[in-house]
C-alpha cells in the first residue's frame, strides 16, 4: 500500500513540476516544493501504514552534509564519465540553451526526491528487511532499470534494453550503495540530483529521453556507442558504468567495514 501510494505521489509531483516549468524563477520553487511535499507524504504515510514511530531513513541530523556529499559524488561521477568520452574523441561541444536552467534544476530536484523515496526508501528497505542487503541491492537496481526502460523515448528497442541494463549496473547499484553506506536517503538524493542536473547541463539525452531541458552546452556524442551510450545518452556507455561502479565499490567497502551489510531478517543498526 505504501509503494502504490508513493508511486501515485511520484507521478503527480513529476507531472506537476513539468507542467509548471514555464514560469521563470518560480520553476525552481515549484520543483523544490514538490520534493518537500513528497518527503512530507512519505513520512506521514510510512508512520501510518507501517506503524513506525520514526522514519529512520530520513534523519534530520547531518541531512545537509549528506546531501552535499551526494552532490559531490554524483557530479564527480558524471564529469569523470564525460572526461573519458572527450579524451577518447567521442564528443563535441556547441552552444547550449541556458535559459531553462532554473526549470531544469527544479525538475531534477523533484525527480531525485520522488524516485529515491520509492526505489531506496521503500523497495530497497522492505526487500532488505526480508532477504538481506545483497539481494535487495540487486532487486532494487533491476526495478530502477525497468522503470527507466518504460520511460524512455528511444524507438530503437535494442538501445533501450541495453540502456536499461546499463542503468541497473551503474545508477541502481551506486544509489543503493549510497543508501547502505549511510543508512539514509539524503546521499542517494544528492547523487541522483547532481548526476541528472550535470547530465542535462551537458545537453545530452537523459535516460533515453531527448534533452528538452536547459543546458550550458550542447554535446554531440560521436564516438563508439559502447563507450558513449549513443542515442540513449551517456548512462548507457561503458564510461558511465565504470565511473559509477568505482564509486559504488568504495561506498560498499565503507559499508562492509562499518558492519552495515544486513543478513536476511536483520534490522538496521544506528549510523555511527
Image (cartoon, helix red, strand yellow):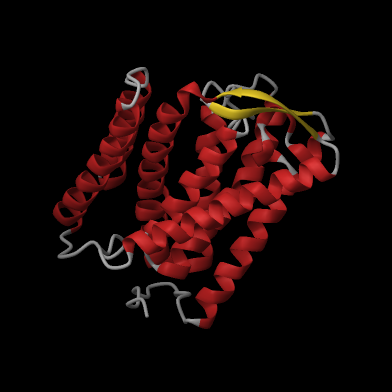
Q: Name the spot of residue 67 as percent of width and height, x first.
A: 40, 57
Q: Nearer the viewer, residue 153 or 138?
A: 153
Residue 271 in view, yes or no: yes
The residue sitting at 35% across, 53% down in the picture is 122
Image quadrant in which you'd find residue 125: bottom left
Q: Nearer the viewer, residue 5 or 185?
A: 185
> Image quadrant for the C terminus?
bottom left
The residue sitting at 41% across, 38% down in the picture is 111
Q: Name the spot of residue 143 as percent of width and height, x first.
A: 50, 45
Residue 246 vertical position relative to residue 91 in the rendered view, above or below: below
Q: How many marks?
A: 0
Q: Nearer the viewer, residue 218 or 130?
A: 218
Image quadrant in which you'd find residue 267: bottom left
Residue 136 in view, yes or no: no
Residue 110 vertical position relative to residue 272 in the rendered view, above or below: above
Q: Name the spot of residue 182 as percent of width and height, x first.
A: 42, 68
The residue sitting at 36% across, 37% down in the picture is 110
Q: Is residue 265 left or right of residue 34?
A: right
Residue 242 vertical position relative to residue 225 in the rendered view, above or below: below
> Image quadrant for the N terminus?
top left
The residue sitting at 62% across, 62% down in the picture is 247
Q: Is residue 241 left or right of residue 45?
A: right
Q: Name the spot of residue 42 as percent of width and height, x first.
A: 24, 48
Amino acid at each position: 500500500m505504501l509503494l502504490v501510494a508513493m508511486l501515485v505521489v511520484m507521478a503527480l509531483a513529476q507531472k506537476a513540476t513539468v507542467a509548471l516549468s514555464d514560469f521563470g524563477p518560480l520553476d525552481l520553487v515549484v520543483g523544490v516544493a514538490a520534493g518537500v511535499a513528497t518527503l512530507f507524504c512519505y513520512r506521514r504515510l510510512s508512520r501510518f501504514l507501517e506503524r513506525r514511530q520514526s522514519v529512520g531513513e530520513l534523519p534530520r541530523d547531518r541531512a545537509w552534509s549528506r546531501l552535499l556529499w551526494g552532490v559531490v559524488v554524483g557530479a564527480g561521477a558524471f564529469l569523470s564519465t564525460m572526461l573519458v568520452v572527450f579524451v577518447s574523441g567521442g564528443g563535441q561541444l556547441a552552444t547550449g540553451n541556458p535559459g531553462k536552467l532554473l526549470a531544469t534544476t527544479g525538475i531534477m530536484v523533484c525527480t531525485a526526491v520522488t524516485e529515491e523515496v520509492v526505489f531506496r526508501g521503500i523497495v530497497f528497505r522492505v526487500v532488505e528487511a526480508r532477504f538481506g542487503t545483497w539481494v535487495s541491492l540487486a532487486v532494487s537496481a533491476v526495478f530502477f532499470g525497468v522503470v527507466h526502460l518504460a520511460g524512455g523515448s528511444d524507438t530503437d528497442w535494442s538501445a533501450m534494453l541495453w540502456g536499461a541494463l546499463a542503468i541497473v549496473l551503474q545508477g541502481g547499484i551506486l544509489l543503493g550503495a549510497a543508501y547502505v553506506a549511510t543508512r539514509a536517503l539524503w546521499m542517494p538524493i544528492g547523487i541522483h540530483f547532481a548526476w541528472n542536473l550535470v547530465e542535462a547541463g551537458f545537453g545530452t539525452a537523459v535516460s533515453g529521453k531527448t534533452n528538452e531541458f536547459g543546458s550550458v552546452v550542447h554535446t554531440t556524442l560521436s564516438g563508439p556507442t559502447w563507450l558513449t551510450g549513443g542515442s540513449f545518452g551517456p548512462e548507457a556507455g561503458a564510461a558511465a558504468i565504470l565511473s559509477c561502479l568505482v564509486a559504488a565499490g568504495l561506498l560498499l567497502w565503507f559499508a562492509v567495514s562499518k558492519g552495515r551489510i544486513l543478513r536476511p531478517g536483520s534490522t538496521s543498526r544506528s549510523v555511527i
